[in-house]
Amino acid sequence: MPAGRTSGPPALRSHAAWPDETLDLVALRGAGWRPTPFRDVVLKVHQRCNLACDYCYVYTMADQSWRERPTVIEPATWRAAAGRMVEHAAAHDLPSMRLVLHGGEPLLAGLDRLTALVRDFRATFDRVCRLDVQLQTNAVLLDARMLGRLRELGVRIGVSLDGTPESNDLHRRYADGRGSFAAVDRALRLLGTPEHRPAFAGLLCTVDPTVDPLACYEALLRYEPPMVDFLLPHANWSAPPVRAAGAGATPHGDWLVAVFDHWYGAARQETRVRLFEDVIALALGGAGRSEQVGLTPVAVLVVETDGAIELVDSLKSTYPGACATGLTVFADPLDAALEHPGVVARQIGSDALCDTCRSCPVHTVCGGGHYAHRFRDGDGFRNPTVYCADMLRLIHHVTRRVASDLMTRLRTDP
């Protein structure tokens, strides 16, 4: 029986024939495949948000399950999650795991609750393995008291910002329409001080091809982030990306190419950019770390405020129930999710790609693109990314430029 028959509400499986109905786990195991243990757990500590970003996959897209979950995580839930993580780490002899505090907006959980949660996790992990803790926030509530406590707890902080005040406030707004830039700017200036800078994990920026790419990038650099993640807006074949009139065939790719040239051509490395570094590494035969490119097994799960164990939450952009596994931290070990078809499909490399992708000469670099962006209602996720042309534009440009530099170096070095 295909693995998909064992999990997920039957009414939802028809949305995604691949992998829910057609992935053959028995055959994969017979051929020698074995799952990769989970290294990252995203913990939803609060289901609500104090912003109303117009591209948010949690609130504006297909899956609206946040409405039915507890608003804030309870101690019994996070303690059960901590126990399951330690159980998993011990079973697979992992040297470390990462906990990512997420939402909604995680800072809405409040300082006292976050403090108790992190201390409970650290106590549970004591003498088992290292626990790295990160928090992803919109930062509008990140004041000196909150930041000081998080830094004391060893929590590293990632902040979402879309560049200049004008470009950020196009999308990242309060429900009443006010922009969020001023509040985020205050928080980032505080985070950038010598006292707090060790807690700064980096910036996350969603690509908008209608804004000036270099102005956006330079605005991010003003905060001296150690890392920048550029993300394509979540879209798929059933809900394609919005393209401005006259934008051309590859607006997102063109935007990324412009930023890449500025980043790559700088006299010194101003920051790390995960997407660009991964494309270069993959093109040279190495491994990537991003969900957006490459074929490295994805080893991350989400635990919701009610304790549900779910697939990565970007899948909420595809169809209702796309993240569901039917498992909970109260009843199930994390190992039980290792044979879920949605997990397996993200760990089997090129076997998960469609024929079009496998025949593409850069498929080991692209990896089919972001998994959520491959979805088409009815047949599921065995398609090229809806951003296929954009990804090809970026990958071909990056590889040509890096190859040219390598050839120049070979010709000039003694």
Image (cartoon, helix red, strand yellow):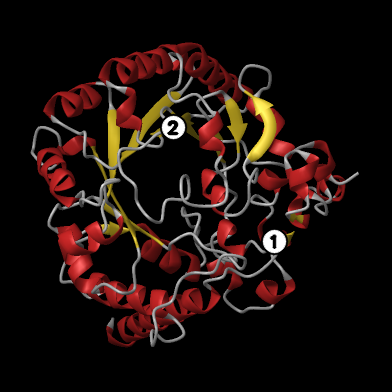
Q: Nearer the viewer, residue 406 or 362?
A: 362
Indicate the amino acid at tag 2. Answer: Gln
Vertical side of 170 occupied by 185: above or below: above
The furthest residue to the front: 176
Q: Looking at the picture, how far across and down is residue 353, in whole percent?
A: 69, 65
Q: Residues within 10 Å of mark 2 (few under 14, many from 20)?
A: many
Can see residue 303?
no
Q: Looking at the picture, how far across and down is residue 131, in whole percent?
A: 41, 26
Residue at left offset 64%, top offset 61%: 375
Indicate the amino acid at tag 1. Answer: Asp
Residue at left offset 65%, top offset 38%: 324
Residue at left offset 56%, top offset 62%: 373
Residue at which label 2 appears? 47
Question: Which quadrant: the C terminus?
Answer: bottom left
**Image-quadrant location for residue 140:** top left
In this image, 73 relative to 299: left or right? left
Can see residue 74?
yes
Q: Looking at the picture, how far across and down is residue 161, in whole percent?
A: 26, 53
Q: Are marks 2 and 1 in contact (CB under 8 Å)?
A: no
CA distance for labels 2 and 1:
26 Å
Question: Which quadrant: the N terminus?
Answer: top right
- Per the rendering, the mark at residue 377 is 1
**Image-quadrant location for residue 231:** bottom left
Residue at left offset 56%, top offset 37%: 65
